[in-house]
Each structure stands twice: as structure tokens, then as C-alpha cells.
Image (cartoon, grey):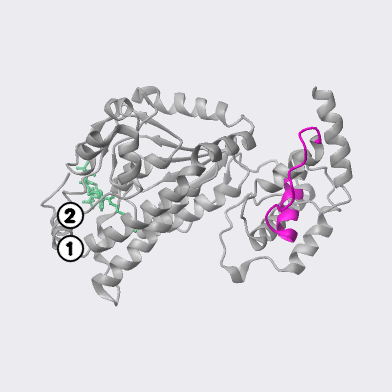
């Protein structure tokens, strides 16, 4: 069987050598439309591919093919070849897996990839670090790719990894890049003793010229974009909960595929205490996961769950002893990252797709309710109380 597959692959890929090749970008490249690659850059990249000194391998060629088709023809629009037409079906699958990626983004990914392939075939660098670093705007988020896993690490341990406005933007950018990079699995985790203490409450103290109303409007828009990225994320998404989790870092867990927690973790959604209401689609996912009365105890009364309780209620997949947490979890993730990435994506699509429309509607409604809540006296008083050190959870 392997021999048969190999023969097919060789025949097909040798046919590709005369065709344009392209691979998705390996680095973080979230750019404004004005900075996207031009048609001329793309044409140059297409010519450059033919000059590559080293064969990039079949997997890369397949990606180049898919990106080229997406960049020139848009989303896959031809009928799926029959089961026995192995070669064309493999090509079709690769093109189809790019979904609705825009022609411009595909063109950019193609150009970025070719430029990386050219650079590495020109000057192999033995000192290059194992991890392919993709650094966001601020140091509060660290993004790395290694062993088929892209890790997005919240890195504000002195503030318990509370999420600043910039961090929401950086996480959106990191997820967008991870959805297109080479990794099979994406992980969100925290640095230090906390996973995340939720929204940074000082976000609400930077009032723009439009005042409280404008602040609430723009925060609701950002929240909606942020949660949408989790709803739409196409690859397996894993939370490695290294300590206590609060607020939005808990609610979005319902949008992850797998949640691993240390036995030191706790899960707390103190929305009523803060004069706020649920977000991250938790008003929908939590009752589905744990039943409506358990969800109400968390979301209305702010009941804090231990890791074991969260696991018993289905929010957490598995709990590990703190002493061996990192070792056990990363060993397992490395093994999972070797599984065929397309199969994992497709399985995720089947599991999640029928819920997406509903989740987007829930997200829109929760964001709009919060926009009102953030302008309420209850919310303002709770934040003032935290900032004046009178209140802690
Ligand atoms: C775009 C907008 C989208 C908005 C989406 C909305 C989301 C809703 C939520 O996420 S609600 C949850 C909000 N979070 C909180 O209310 C947590 C507030 N923090 C605390 O209660 C405590 O800090 C603690 C229980 C998390 C930890 O207590 P501990 O005693 O262990 O540690 P400290 O309090 O001394 O914390 C160390 C420093 O970190 C600062 N800090 C912690 N969390 C936050 C936070 N969420 N916002 C701002 N700052 C935070 C804390 O103030 C200390 O700072 P200092 O050293 O300068 O004093």
C-alpha cells in the first residue's frame, strides 16, 4: 500500500515540478491590506520556486499547489474527484482545506513561504533555533512553534496574566497566524502561578474622547472579534491551564477542543460580583456542557470550581498532579501533534461546524448585553472597588 501511495505521489509531484509551488507562511504575518503581496511579488515567487536548489518535499509541494490555486482561482470550486482518483483527490483536499482564505492572503502566504524556502536553500543555518518564534506586538504574549505545536503563552505573571487590550489584539493575530501555519495543534497557556485572571480591570479606566459609551462600544466590538477567532479556529485547540483561571479565560474554555489542568487550577466566573454578564459563548456552552443548574451556579452566583470539580462537570478534560503537569501534558501533546493534521482538521470541522452559526449569534448577543452592562453603576462600582484595593475575588 505504501509503495502504491508512494508511486502515485511521485508521479503526481513530478508533474507538479513544472507548475507553480507554494507553502503557507511559517511566520506571524498579520498585515494590513496595503502591505499584502502584489501580483508582481506573486509572479516573482512563482518563478523563484522553479529555481529552488533543494526539493522541498511532497508535503510542502502539496501546500504550494493548494495556495497557488487559492491565490489564482479562489476557494475550491470544482467537484471532488472520485475515491479511486488518489492523486487528484489529494490535490483537491489540500486546496479545499484552505476554505474561504482570501486570494490576497493566499498570495501573501505563497510569497512568504517561497521567500523562506529560498532563504533556507541558499544559506542553511545550523544555529537556527529549534523553535520558530513569532513575536507579537508586546512582551505580554509569547508565541512559539515547535514539534508541530504552536504555543500562545500569556506572559504577564506579575499581574496574574490579566488580559490588556493589546493582548486581545495580539491573541487574535496569533490565532489567525496559527490557523495557517505548519503546526498541527495550537495551545493557549500562561506563565507563572496563574493561567489568567481574566480581563485586566484597568482596561476600563482608559476612557477615550467619546467617554464611557465609546469605551463600551469599542470593548464590545473587540470582545466579539476575539471570541469569533476561537469559534472559527480550524485546528485542534488545547488549553494548558497551569493555575487558577478567572473570567473570560474560563468562559472561552467551552470553545476549546481539549482542556488539561493542573490540580492547582480553579475556575471562577464572578460576573455578578463585577456587575457584568457571561461572555465567550458560556451562556450557551456551559449549560450544554454541565447542565443548566451547575452552569447557573457558576455564571450567576460566581461559584468557584476546583480542577476536579471542573473535570467532573466536563469543562476540563483531565487533571494532572501539579508536580508532573508540564512533563505529562507536553509529552502527550507532542504525540498528538504527529497525527495527520488534515484528518484532525476535518474531524474538528465535523464536530464543530453545525454549531458555528449558533455560537456566532450567542457571541453577538453576549457582547451587546455587556456593552450595556459596562456602562452600569453596578459594574463601575465593582471596578472602582477593585482598583481602590477594597475588593478582591
Ligand atoms: C475587550 C474587553 C473584553 C472584556 C471581556 C470581559 C471579561 C470579564 C472578566 O474577565 S471578569 C474577571 C475580571 N478579573 C477579576 O476580577 C480578577 C481581579 N483580580 C483579583 O481578584 C486578584 O488579583 C486575584 C484573585 C486574581 C489574585 O489575587 P492575589 O492576592 O493572588 O494577587 P494580587 O491581587 O496581589 O495580584 C497581583 C497583581 O496583579 C493585579 N491583577 C490581578 N488580576 C488583575 C486584573 N484582572 N486586572 C487588573 N489587575 C490585576 C493586581 O492588581 C496586582 O497588581 P499590583 O501588584 O500592582 O498590586
Where residue 4 appears, as percent x and y from the top left, is 84, 26
Residue 83 in which image quadrant: top right
Where residue 349 sits, quadrant-wise, is top right
Does 68 sit above or below residue 327?
Answer: below
Q: Nearer the viewer, residue 103 or 287?
A: 287
- Identify the residue position indicated by label 2 in the image: 275
Q: Secondary structure at mark 1?
A: loop
Q: Position of residue 198 (x, y in %)?
A: 30, 48
Q: Which residue is mark 1?
A: 376
**In the image, residue 385 lies at what x, y percent?**
13, 56
The residue segment tinted magenta is 63-85
Mark pair 1, 2: CA separation: 8 Å
Q: Residues within 10 Å of mark 1 (few under 14, many from 20)?
A: some
Q: Residue at x 15, y 55 (%)?
A: 382
The answer to whether residue 299 of the structure is visible from this angle is yes
Q: Is residue 70 magenta?
A: yes
Q: In the rendered image of this protein, does residue 73 appear above or below residue 182?
A: below
Q: Which image quadrant for residue 285? A: top left
Helix, strand or loop for disc 2: loop
Would residue 194 be seen by someone viewing this image from the given angle? no
Amino acid at each position: 500500500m505504501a509503495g502504491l501511495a508512494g508511486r502515485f505521489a511521485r508521479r503526481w509531484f513530478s508533474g507538479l515540478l513544472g507548475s507553480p509551488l507554494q507553502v503557507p507562511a511559517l511566520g506571524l504575518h498579520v498585515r494590513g491590506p496595503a502591505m499584502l503581496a502584489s501580483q508582481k511579488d506573486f509572479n516573482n515567487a512563482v518563478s523563484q520556486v522553479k529555481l529552488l536548489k533543494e526539493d522541498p518535499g511532497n508535503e510542502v509541494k502539496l501546500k504550494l499547489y493548494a495556495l497557488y490555486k487559492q491565490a489564482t482561482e479562489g476557494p475550491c470550486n470544482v467537484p471532488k474527484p472520485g475515491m479511486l482518483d488518489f492523486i487528484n483527490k489529494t490535490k483537491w483536499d489540500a486546496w479545499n482545506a484552505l476554505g474561504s482564505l482570501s486570494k490576497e492572503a493566499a498570495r501573501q502566504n505563497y510569497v512568504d513561504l517561497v521567500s523562506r524556502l529560498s532563504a533556507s536553500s541558499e544559506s542553511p543555518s545550523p544555529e537556527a533555533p529549534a523553535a520558530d518564534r513569532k513575536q507579537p506586538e508586546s512582551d505580554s504574549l509569547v508565541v512559539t512553534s515547535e514539534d508541530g505545536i504552536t504555543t500562545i503563552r500569556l506572559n504577564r505573571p506579575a499581574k496574574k496574566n490579566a488580559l490588556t487590550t493589546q493582548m486581545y489584539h495580539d491573541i487574535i493575530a496569533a490565532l489567525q497566524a496559527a490557523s495557517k501555519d505548519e503546526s498541527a495543534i495550537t495551545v493557549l497557556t500562561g506563565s507563572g502561578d496563574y493561567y489568567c485572571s481574566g480581563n485586566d480591570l484597568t482596561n476600563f479606566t482608559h476612557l477615550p474622547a467619546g467617554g464611557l459609551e465609546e469605551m463600551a462600544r469599542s470593548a464590545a466590538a473587540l470582545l466579539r472579534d476575539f471570541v469569533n477567532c476561537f469559534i472559527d479556529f480550524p485546528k485542534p485547540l488545547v488549553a494548558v491551564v497551569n493555575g487558577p483561571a478567572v473570567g473570560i479565560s474560563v468562559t472561552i474554555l467551552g470553545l476549546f477542543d481539549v482542556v488539561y489542568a493542573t490540580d492547582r487550577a480553579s475556575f471562577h466566573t464572578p460576573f455578578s460580583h463585577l456587575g457584568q454578564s457571561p461572555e465567550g459563548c458560556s451562556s450557551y456552552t456551559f449549560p450544554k456542557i454541565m447542565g443548566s443548574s451547575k452552569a447557573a451556579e457558576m455564571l450567576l452566583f460566581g461559584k468557584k470550581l476546583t480542577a476536579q470539580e471542573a473535570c467532573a462537570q466536563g469543562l476540563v478534560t483531565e487533571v494532572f498532579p501539579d508536580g508532573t503537569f508540564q512533563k505529562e501534558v507536553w509529552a502527550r501533546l507532542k504525540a498528538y501533534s504527529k497525527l495527520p493534521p488534515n484528518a484532525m482538521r476535518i474531524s474538528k470541522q465535523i464536530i464543530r461546524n453545525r454549531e458555528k452559526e449558533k455560537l456566532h449569534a450567542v457571541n453577538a448577543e453576549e457582547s451587546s448585553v455587556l456593552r450595556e452592562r459596562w456602562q452600569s453603576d453596578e459594574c463601575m462600582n465593582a471596578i472602582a472597588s477593585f482598583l481602590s484595593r477594597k475588593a478582591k475575588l
